[in-house]
Image (cartoon, rainbow, N blue to C red):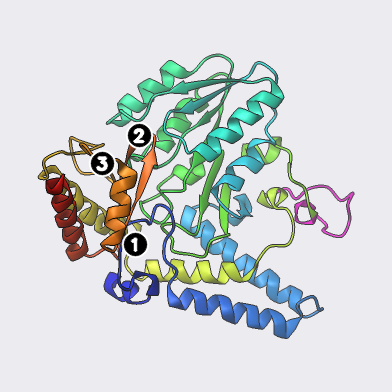
Amino acid sequence: MSLTLRQQLPALAGKHYFNYGGQGPLPTPSLEAMVACWQKLQQLGPFGRDVWPWLNQELAALRSALGQLCGVPPRRLALTENVTSGCVLPLWGLPFEPGDRLLISDAEHPGVLAACRELARRQGLEIDYFPVQQVRSDAELLESLEQGLTGRTRLVVLSHLLWNSGIPMPIAAVAERLQAQRQRPWLLVDAAQSVGSIELGQAPAAADIFAFTGHKWCCGPEGLGAVVLSERLLAEASPTLIGWRSLSHETEAGSGWHRDGRRFEVATSCVPLGAGLRQSLELLEGCGNAAQREAEICLRSGQLWSGLQAIPGVRTLVEAAPPRSGLVSFVVEGHQPEQLVNRLADQGFQLRSLADPHCLRACTHLTTSPEEVQALLLSLEELVHQS
């Protein structure tokens, strides 16, 4: 079935694509679903009486699909544009006090990190960091977390799947450990790399903020994501960027906020994007359940990781065993990652470089073939030998 999916991705024609962690190609049926939705929207309105029941059905179907994806009731979801807005909007609504501390892993994305730093500056908070890039077991991760916690820690920030090394984090175990703390710190999870690539398990339900996007591993359109919010957050956090969709009665400014995740939604958004994302999720489900899809993704990343071990001068960030995800990061001795990315692009290979750590990152998905993994390995070996 993954071959069938690949044939529905016109962006893969004539190239070897290894950038799913940045953006996934959009399947043709998803584009067609979006166009059909736009056409229906224009036929009904777009702001006429008859359009609103249909729009509500579209949004309800999207919330239901995303709730099933994450294993949570739709009321705990807020629709967003991307991962960053999903993290930041509820984060800035939490009840912090001056002197509270934020504990952030050393492997977080710059976008989330910058938002936390600005929040700390404005509200008089302190930031601590705990190392995760070098941990290789859940026990090591939990020990690192424990060493970073203080009596004033009010928020922990940790990605579900590290965007630089591809190592999954035990989010449910972290949440359980935080619940045992007297101050019960909030848990913010950047799930940009996990949703659509690995089994989610209890992670979405366990976190207070679990933000993800549809345009990476889900192969949906850019501009649409969601965030799962805990019941505790819904009870205690206030909306931040406020609009008519935040209100329980959208035409009455004094009506109060929605009591569910919609309080963190803002105003008019692009409904047809939801039709495209739902279609992409259906296509992925046609390739097997979450565990089966993860196994196939890891089969290809394992092939890439193993092949890299055999190339002199190449070192993978995860050294002891193949990654438990589709992300494979590596360095090539004597070569700048940016230069290698450009030279590989000249040969039809699309991957990217990272700044911290300074390396290359290649991503395998369901649509990655064994042949193109082997082709990438051969090209890398030739480039190394040319130096």
Taking the spot 48% from the left edge, 72% from the top edge, the residue there is 279
Residue 256 part of the magenta-drawn span: yes
Q: Position of residue 271 (x, y in %)?
A: 64, 68
Residue 209 got which mark?
A: none
Tag 1: amino acid: Asn
Query: Pointer 1: what residue?
Result: 289
The residue closer to the viewer here, 348 or 224, is 348
Residue 72 to residue 169: above or below: below
Residues drawn in magenta: 244-259
Q: Sequence order check: which comes first, mark 2 or mark 3?
A: 3
Taking the spot 48% from the left edge, 39% from the top edge, the residue there is 109
Tag 2: amino acid: Pro
Q: CA distance from mark 2 to mark 3?
A: 10 Å
Q: Position of residue 206 (x, y in %)?
A: 49, 40
Q: Is residue 71 left or right of residue 223?
A: left
Is disc 3 surrounded by few (<14), some (14 to 19) or many (20+) residues within 10 Å? many
**Quadrant of the image containing the C terminus:** top left
Residue 357 got which mark?
A: 2
Q: CA distance from mark 3 to mark 1?
A: 29 Å
Residue 330 got which mark?
A: 3
Q: Are marks 2 and 3 in contact (CB under 8 Å)?
A: no
**Quadrant of the image occupied by residue 112:** top right
